[in-house]
Amino acid sequence: MQYTLHLRDRDLSLLHTHAENCLPLESVALLFGVIEDHLVVVTRIECVRNESDKAATSFYVNPEEEYQLLMDAEARGEELVGIFHSHPAALMPSSSDLDNMRLNPVVWLIASKTSGAWSSKGFVLDDAIAVEIPIMIMADVS
Ligand SMILES: [Zn+2]
């Protein structure tokens, strides 16, 4: 089953700005939305603080903050559909990312600017292997 991530152009820009502002640390954001068939539609992003002790190479979200955001999302009829974080290095899930993907089986959106400008790729875990999924950028409405 092939998932496609739907993301607003504006939200992707906000995520990349968040990643830039967090340098030299990794940035984190939670992606909320709905899953319709094979489409993972992001309707809202929440940039959160990276509370890792080694925030230059890993990330950790405060569990109370995450819980509060999950409760808010549930009240809005949304669910956690993805986790965004940025990398100082390659645009690939690290071995600790793979462990965390197992615990949080949502879309993992990873950003890197090793090529000069920020770019992001989406991954899902399939049989312990990270598989890249297509990202469809939606034009901003309203
Ligand atoms: Zn990572």
Image: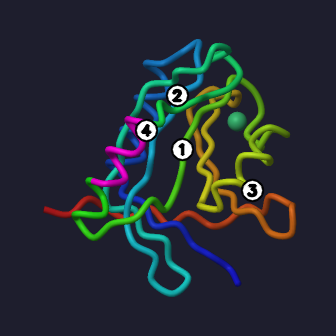
Q: Which residues are magenta?
A: 64-71
Relative placement, left or right, of 25 versus 33 is right
Q: Amino acid at mark 4?
A: Leu
Report the mark closest to the observer, 1 or 3: 3
**Is label 2 in a helix, a strand or a loop?**
loop
**Sequence-first disc among 4 and 1:** 4
Question: Badge 3 local density, few (<14 within 10 Å), some, or many (20+)?
Answer: some
**Closer mark to the observer between disc 4 and disc 3:** 3
Residue corresponding to mark 4? 15
Q: Are marks 2 and 4 in contact (CB under 8 Å)?
A: yes
Residue plotted at (49% across, 62% down) = 81
Do residues under tags 2 and 1 come within 8 Å of each other at their CB atoms? yes
Residue 70 lies in the magenta stretch: yes
What SS does tag 4 mark?
Answer: helix
Mark 1 residue type? Phe
Ligand 1 under 8 Å from disc 3 Cβ: no
- Locate the C terminus by quadrant: bottom left
Image position, residue 89 (x, y; %): 75, 26
| Residue type at tag 3 | Arg
- Identify which residue is drawn at 86% across, 69% down: 127
What secondary structure is found at the residue carrying circle 3?
helix
Q: Which mark is residue 27?
A: 2
**Location of residue 122 in the rendering, given as x and y in whole percent from the top left corner:** 63, 56
The residue carrying pointer 4 sits among few (fewer than 14), some (14 to 19) or many (20 or more) residues within 10 Å by Cα, namely many
Residue position marked by numbered label 3 in the rendering: 102
